Image (tube, rainbow, N blue to C red):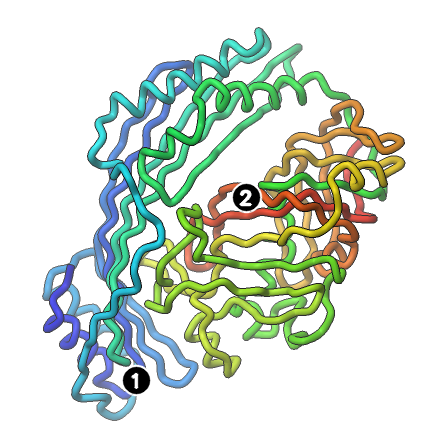
Amino acid sequence: MLSQELLKEALGKALSTGADYAEVFAEHTQSKNIGIVSEKVDKAANAVISGVGIRIFKGTRCVSGSASSLSREAVLDCAARVADAMSGSAGIADIKLQERLFGDIHPVKIVPGSVGNTYKIDYLRQACTAAKEYDAQISQVIGKYLEVDHKILIATSEGLLAQDRQIRTRLMISSIASKGGENQTGGYNPGARKGVELFEDFDPVELGRRASRQAVTMLNAGYIDAGTMPVAIENGFGGVIFHEACGHSLEASCVALGQSQFAGKLGQQIANPKVTAIDDGTIPNGWGSINIDDEGTPSQKNVLIENGILKTYMIDKLNGRRMGMASTGSSRRQSYQFEPTSRMTNTYIAAGEDRDEDIIGSIEYGLYAKEMGGGSVNPVTGQFNFSVMEGYIIRNGKVCEPVRGASLIGKGSDIIMNIDMVGKNVARGQGMCGASSGSIPTDVGQPLIRVSSITVGGR
């Protein structure tokens, strides 16, 4: 992507005004987005992103810049602009780069770019047709296919030269059910760090039916009454609760500035002893998995909370300097245009010892959140509000009628203390996480859990 000679020259120029660390991040990304609406192709777009981002540190001061070209002139001009923003004496004169190969634990069988659109569109159409035919109340179906081939190169003044190629593929089906002027949406959006072989993991007919079943179920559901009650949150995308309510507060970008509900609590009990929470970027073919982070640090399995005790944070280089702690391979960015910072990869609550039937059976009256939706959180206070996409009332230990309009409201530090039952069957769901360094692919996950008491919003 860039020659070693150019990289060394750019690093030297970036250091020329006294910085003690410099980094070049180069990127070439190709992506494809296909959309189908009402079984007709609505979109088939290709995109290419190519450019360089350069950062320098002096202590805990950081300056960064970017250029939308990988030409010699653009790279050196970017390095000069960054250096000009840092005043000081001359920096390191001789930079020696040593290329490191970290391997790839995410094998891709079929590179998406080698497969024509016809095959991808036919698969989407099968899913959309099955979704439309599921029930007469389905008024519209939207299908989307996404592929990304993301190539990165990182070189630093510490001598590191590393590269990675990240291929991801995702399928998204959204069904809208309508009755009497009301609409309800259901969806299913699986993805992985895989190629087109992802299609082999999912029957398109079942994928479409799953989306429509949720939409129809919620269209014909009654509304839940608001109140405080126990809630059972299903596995898979239910893990978005931990991701949002607690995960962001464990990122060093918040912790280092004291803007986290968990700052200064290493070694303390912050969760129920049944809770062990992990961020693991090394899961083979995981949607949020990486071989190296966007600073060139190898990805690793970080046990954040173990049996309720806070063990570590997710740390990048700059915030690691502020905290006096080493990087945990957690630095990520959407593209060269964003400055990297600590972010999640695949974050989940680990398996416990409780049986699913015992979790449901323990609730006399409460909510079963089968599928979670989106929400918002303040990482400083931990206050959150999440919608429940698909919910059911639990009565006398049995899952009963579906209910809509439910939301979960609370504080992250409270909810993880109130998780008092943890099931055995961990599953993960895929999403895109937005923060200061852009939108990045992340997995969330957990087994079925019980929150002993939480505020449920409703009518």
Please, what secondary structure does the residue beneath circle 2 have? strand
The x, y position of residue 113, in whole percent, is 22, 36
Could you say where residue 24 lies in the image, as x and y percent from the top left?
25, 69
Task: Identify the amino acid type marked 2.
Answer: Arg
Query: x, y percentage for residue 31?
Result: 28, 40
Q: Which mark is residue 19?
A: 1
At 27% from the left and 69% from the top, the residue drawn is 54
User: Is disc 2 in contact with disc 1, using a CB cutoff of under 8 Å?
Assistant: no
Query: 240 or 10, which is in the foreground?
Result: 240
Residue 220 can be seen in this image: yes
The dot on residue 410 is none
The residue depicted at 36 percent of the width and 21 percent of the height is: 123
Of tags 2 and 1, which is closer to the observer?
2
Helix, strand or loop at mark 1? loop
| Image vertical order of residue 94 relative to residue 277, above or below | below
Amino acid on which disc 1 is placed = Ala
Q: Which residue appears at 60% of the width and 19% of the height?
A: 213
| Mark closer to the chain start, 2 or 1 | 1
Frontmost residue, 43 versus 124: 124
Q: Is residue 326 above or below residue 216?
A: below
Q: Is any atom of residue 83 visible in this view?
A: no
Between marks 2 and 1, how big is the CA–CA gap?
42 Å
Residues packed near mark 2 inside 10 Å, few (<14), some (14 to 19) or many (20 plus)? many
Position of residue 392 in the picture relative to residue 255 (left or right): right
290 and 184: which one is in front?
290
The image quadrant where one finds the C terminus is: top right
Disc marking residue 428: 2
Q: Residues within 10 Å of mark 1 (few under 14, many from 20)?
A: many
Question: Residue 21: which quarter of the image?
Answer: bottom left
The answer to whether residue 180 is left or right of residue 54 is: right
- Tell me the quadrant of the picture where the N terminus can be found: bottom left
Q: Position of residue 152 (x, y in %)?
A: 26, 58
